[in-house]
Amino acid sequence: MASPTLNDTELEKEYGRRNLPVGSVIFDQPGDLGYQCPFGHTGDWLSFSEFKDHIWCYKCKMDYHYAADCQLRRMCWMSDNQWRDFIARLPMKPQVIEGIQHFPDCEIPHEVESEL
């Protein structure tokens, strides 16, 4: 469990560990928000890392910084306004990939359908 540039001890020192209260439930996983690792893995391959600001890829077995290493594509369920608001709320500007990421069970809002 390390990042491409830091080992676990260095990750903990530089970023710290997530402190989620016992019984916390994360509703939106990174793949649900449109993230993919540098090698294109998304969906169930990704979860939030034990380290702050990082995403864990089960396929790569690596922690990636969500903005510096990972890429982000607008999800099919997000309207244009939701997408802009989501990006604006992030503390760092992510690497945005053009286009829309689709999943088989994704319900496409009417506003997004007209853009396709």
Image (spheres, grey):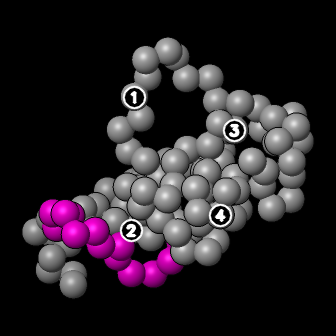
Q: Give the residue displayed 21% in from the left and 64% down from the top.
A: 106
Left or right, 29 with reference to 76: right
Q: Quadrant of the C terminus?
A: bottom left
Q: Secondary structure at mark 1?
A: loop
Label located before the other in sequence (4 or 1) = 1
Residue occupied by mark 4? 60
**Closer to us: mark 2 or mark 3?**
3
Q: What are the residue bounds of the magenta stretch? A: 94-108
Label located before the other in sequence (2 or 1) = 1
- Residue placed farthest to the bottom in the image? 116
Alpha carbon distance from label 3 to label 1: 17 Å
Q: Secondary structure at mark 4?
A: loop
Residue 106 visible in the current orientation: yes
Label 3 environment density (alpha carbons within 10 Å; few <14, some 14–19, many ≥20): many
Residue occupied by mark 2? 74
Camera-side residue of 18 and 84 = 18
Label located before the other in sequence (2 or 4) = 4
- Check the image and report above or below for 108 versus 86: below
Label located before the other in sequence (2 or 3) = 3
Camera-side residue of 55 and 89 = 55
Q: Amino acid at mark 2?
A: Arg
Alpha carbon distance from label 4 to label 1: 24 Å
Query: Which picture quadrant has residue 27?
Result: top left
As drawn, the label of residue 51 is 3
Q: Amino acid at mark 1?
A: Val
Q: Are marks 4 and 1 in contact (CB under 8 Å)?
A: no
